[in-house]
Image (spheres, coloured by chain):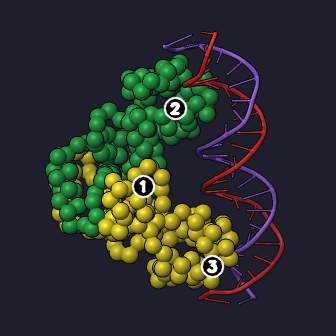
Chain colours: A green, B yellow, C red, D purple
Amino acid sequence: MAALKDRGVRVTSPRKAIADHLEHRRGGFTIEALCEELPSVGRATVYRTVKLLLEVGGVCKLALMDGSQVYTVSRAGHHHHYVCVACGAVEEFRAASVERLLSSIGHELPGEVVDHRIELYVICGNCPAEWA
Amino acid sequence: MAALKDRGVRVTSPRKAIADHLEHRRGGFTIEALCEELPSVGRATVYRTVKLLLEVGGVCKLALMDGSQVYTVSRAGHHHHYVCVACGAVEEFRAASVERLLSSIGHELPGEVVDHRIELYVICGNCPAEWA
DNA sequence: CTCAGTGCAAATATTTTGCACTATG
DNA sequence: CATAGTGCAAAATATTTGCACTGAG
């Protein structure tokens, strides 16, 4: 991940292994899953690296519908996520209309809005309708 | 909490203690905080009761800006939250315009939107501007 | 070379569970 | 009174940390 390099952080082989692996990964992931998928990397390093990627914006942490949390690779700047509740696929979306609306809602609220988070839960096109 | 009773769940004194306590509580709370505030209730019961309230809709679980999670008392039906990043206060808001917009965005996404979550992060009116 | 980063194992923290006991309905 | 619910302490999980060692720059 280039973002790491720019921060004066060393590009070590465990970090590279994690970044490469995530690059090809679909959907959300948990630390535990990452550890299983990359047995050559120590658990502590996985924790440390994911935390680092989170700070740098390389991954996002998001809430599933049941309230549990997973990480997901971040591909763009500001964005939101939609998550398939059936297969767990996670995609990003961006919509200027949302930003505009939220900012106008912000005006009606006391105080100043500094950030926001949106998650949409969907049954994605690949998942059978019976999941509904 | 009436919702519990309607579900054929017993109204025991620990549950009542928790519900009463939450009634008067401001902002989000963690299990740990609840345990400290209600030392007479066993930790396991706090976990079990909060999980129950979550299922019944008596409390919501929400993500703070840093990704950590807290619970908050739910006062209305469908709603979203705005959280002060300075003092931790949590309030609910509802906006038909948001629902409308999200549903229209849903049409542009593959699959069917089944639910959503929105959190706004604010500096509330009571908190000094320096927090910005 | 140097020291940020690593792996490991131990220390912590968090959540769940088994079980004998209590009290609601 | 029957049994859902409780508290406790143990077990299972999840996360963090100390430290000697390694390799990126």
Q: Callout 3: residue from which chain?
A: B
Q: Callout 1: residue from which chain?
A: B
In the image, residue B88 above or below residue A60: below
Circle 3: element type: helix
> Does label 3 or label 1 sit earlier along the sequence?
3
Q: In this view, does B17 lie to the left or right of A131?
A: right
Q: In this view, does C13 lie to the left or right of A98?
A: right
Q: Mark 2 points at which residue?
A: A49
How far is mark 3 from mark 2, CA to CA?
A: 42 Å
* Amino acid carrying mark 1 in the image: Leu
Circle 1: element type: loop
Q: Callout 2: residue from which chain?
A: A
Q: Mark 1 points at which residue?
A: B64
Q: Do labels 3 and 1 share a chain?
A: yes
Q: B38 or B76, which lies in front?
A: B38
In the image, residue A46 above or below residue A61: above
* Amino acid carrying mark 2 in the image: Thr
* Amino acid carrying mark 3 in the image: Pro
Q: Residue at x 40, y 41 (%)?
A: A60
Q: Mark 3 points at which residue?
A: B14
Spot occupied by residue A95 in the image (x, y as percentages of width and height): 19, 46
Q: Are marks 1 and 2 on the same chain?
A: no
How packed mark 1 is, by other alpha carbons closer than 10 Å (few <14, some 14-19, many 20 or more), is many
